[in-house]
Amino acid sequence: MVYSGETSHELSYAVSKSPLGKYKYRGVLVSSADIGMNGNETPVMPYGNVHGGLVQIQEDWYIFYHRQTHAIECSRQGCAEKLIVNADGSFNQAEITSCGLNRGPLPTMGTYNACYCCCLMGSLFSKEKLNVRQHRRENEGYIYEESVGNDETKAIHYLTNLRKDTVVGFKYFDWKDVQRITVKLRGEGTVFVKVCIDSPNGECLGEKEIDLSCSWEDSTIEVKSVEGIHALYFLLYTESCVEFMEFSF
């Protein structure tokens, strides 16, 4: 039985020999803010309630869940994480990533939407969960959807309201032959962007001060070459407001 726990941000599970019970609690499958992952107590994403289910796809098990968007609890982005199955059949808590059903790290090629982030935080972000009666659009960055024309089936997705010192992170990439990363941004004033790996305080591969405009524009950041599996973090420092649509290798 998979259910949303009383903390609201995590999906837990219990097991029984009969659908009617008795059930025994076995642990957390996923937290939409990675709370409890390796002892972490700080939310890595704005978070609220969570719903989802457990699915076996061929030999692998996945937990489907959602993250919050639009700086409110009731707008959501569907996600999936692969679960580690132990020898006794129990599951470990899944780390939230940007990989979804990819069955491994993402390749460092092509373009990725910034809304695939699994880390969105900064000094202006609250550590408290969202609830149905509030929004936090004044201070916090958030995942956003914007309609294109009058066609409700078409939209663009991007991160908006990124202020002061926002961290946007993605896990994980298989780094090969990367010499530059291009970011698509818009906003006012300037933003100083640092590209780091492994953690927000990890090795800095490159940095650049970018002049923003009210139109989406590409800016290329030269980066040091690395190899292997690494998380990617963009650190954005600004005195205004930045919007972040995508990045390309």
Image (cartoon, rainbow, N blue to C red):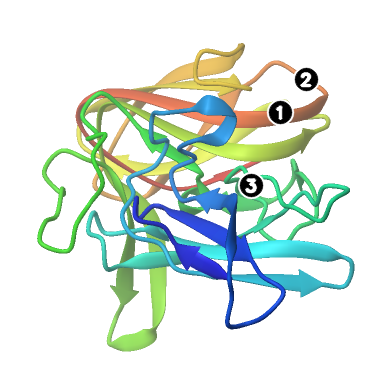
For residue 20, above or below residue 67: below
Q: Answer with left or right where residue 68 lies relative to residue 98.
A: left
Q: CA distance from mark 1 to mark 3?
A: 17 Å
Where in the figure is residue 194, as x and y percent of width and height? 47, 19
Name the residue: 23% across, 54% down. 71
Name the residue: 74% across, 40% down. 108
User: On the image, numbered disc 1 is attached to which residue?
Assistant: 230
Name the residue: 55% across, 51% down. 30
Where in the figure is residue 36, as x and y percent of width and height? 50, 35
Mark 3 or 2, nearer chain start? 3
User: On the image, numbered disc 2 is attached to which residue?
Assistant: 226
Among the 4 quarters of the image, the one containing residue 164:
top left
Q: Nearer the viewer, mark 1 or mark 3?
A: 3
Q: Nearer the viewer, mark 1 or mark 2?
A: 1
Where in the figure is residue 149, as x and y percent of width and height? 29, 81
In depth, the one of 6 and 146 nearer the eye is 6
Contact (Cβ within 8 Å) of mark 1 with mark 2: yes
Crowding near the residue tagged with mark 3, few <14, some 14–19, many ≥20 C-alpha atoms within 10 Å: many
Q: Answer with left or right where residue 49 lies relative to residue 130.
A: right
For residue 201, above or below residue 138: above
Among the 4 quarters of the image, the one containing residue 16:
bottom right
User: On the image, numbered disc 3 is attached to which residue?
Assistant: 94
Mark 1 or 3, nearer chain start? 3
Q: CA distance from mark 1 to mark 2?
A: 9 Å
The amino acid type of the residue labelled 3 equals: Ala
Name the residue: 63% across, 39% down. 171
Secondary element at image label 1? strand
The amino acid type of the residue labelled 1 equals: His
Crowding near the residue tagged with mark 1, few <14, some 14–19, many ≥20 C-alpha atoms within 10 Å: some
